[in-house]
Amino acid sequence: MTITLYAKAAEELRGNEDQWRAYESAGNCAVLAGPGAGKTKTITVKIAKLLGEDVRRPRRVACITYSNACVGELLTRFRKLGVGEDDRLLLSTVHSFCLTELVLPYGRMAGVDLPDPLVVASTAQSRDAFQEAYKRALGGQPPKWYRTEFDKLRRTIVDRDSTEWKTWPTRETEVVTAYDALLLERGFIDFDGLVLTGLRLVENHEWIRRAIRAKYPIIVIDEYQDLGLPLHRMVLSLMKKVGVRIIAVGDPDQSIYGFTGAKPERVPELVEG
C-alpha cells in the first residue's frame, strides 16, 4: 500500500524537471527553491521512496526541521503517504535530535561535563540565568535588546578557542561564559546548549560520527536556511568524514531567523562542498 501511495504521488512530480531530478537522486542532494515551489512535497515523497526501497531495519532515516509546528506539518504529509507511523522514520526538531541522538547517548561517554540528571532549562530558568550572568560579568540589569545579541553570539562563534572568539569584545564573551557556567551550576542545559554540545560531539569524535552513520545512513533537513551554523557544521562533518547521505531542503534567498545567526547562503554550500 505504501509503495502505491508514494508512487502515485511521485507521478505528480514527473512534469517538473527539478522535482523529478531530486526525487530520482541517488546521492547527496540540495533542493533549492522559493516559497510555493513544492519543496516540501518533493522531499516527503522522496523520503517515502527511500523507506519503500532503500532503508532496511534497524537503519533509519532522520528528518530534521526547525520547530514542532514544522514537525506537525511534515507528519501530516507523511501520513497521507502511508509512512507517518513508520518506526524507520525519525521526525524531529534539531534540538530534539541533538538531545536524543547525541547528548543523551554519547555525552558522558565522550567526557562532556553535563548536568546529572540532564534537565533542559525552561524559558524562565534560562532568562533568570542570563540576567544573573550579566550581573556577575558586567553588573546591573541587561538592556532589553541584549539577549538577542547574546544568543546570536553563542550561535555564530562556536569555537571558544578561536581567534574570532578571543578578539571579540570581552564584555560580551564574559556574559556568555558566565551564563554557560551558571546553567551547569544550576543543573541545566538550554536548547542552544544541546545543539552546541551535539556539534562538539560530532566534530571531535570519529566513533560518534560512525555510530550516527550506522543508525542514520540518510539525514534529511527541512528549512535548512533557518537552522544555523552549528547544524551546518554537523552536517558537513557527517557528510564529508563518514559519508552520511544528506538531503537538504531550503530557500537560499530568505531566512526569517537571520537575527539568530541563520544564513541562507549555507544551503548551496552543500552542493559546492
Image: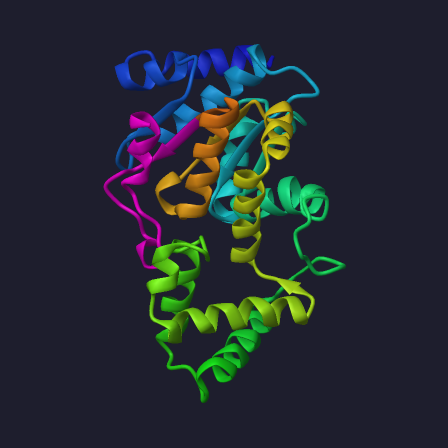
Q: Nearer the viewer, residue 256 or 28?
A: 28
Residue 81: x %, y % from top left: 53, 22
Q: Is residue 250 magenta?
A: yes
The residues colored magenta run 247-273
As drawn, the residue found furthest toward the right would be: 117
Q: Nearer the viewer, residue 213 or 89?
A: 213
Which residue does the image show at 26% across and 36% down from the upper left?
Answer: 34
For the N terminus, give its image quadrant. Answer: top right
Q: Is residue 169 magenta?
A: no
Using the image, determine if residue 210 lies above or below residue 122.
above
Which residue does the image show at 55% across and 57% down from the upper left?
Answer: 193
As drawn, the residue found furthest toward the bottom would be: 140
As drawn, the residue found furthest toward the left would be: 253
Residue 115: x %, y % from top left: 70, 61
Which residue does the image show at 43% across and 36% down from the upper left?
Answer: 222
Relative placement, left or right, of 241 versus 97 is: left
Relative placement, left or right, of 16 versus 148 is: left
Which quadrant holds residue 247? Answer: top left
Residue 212: x %, y % from top left: 61, 30
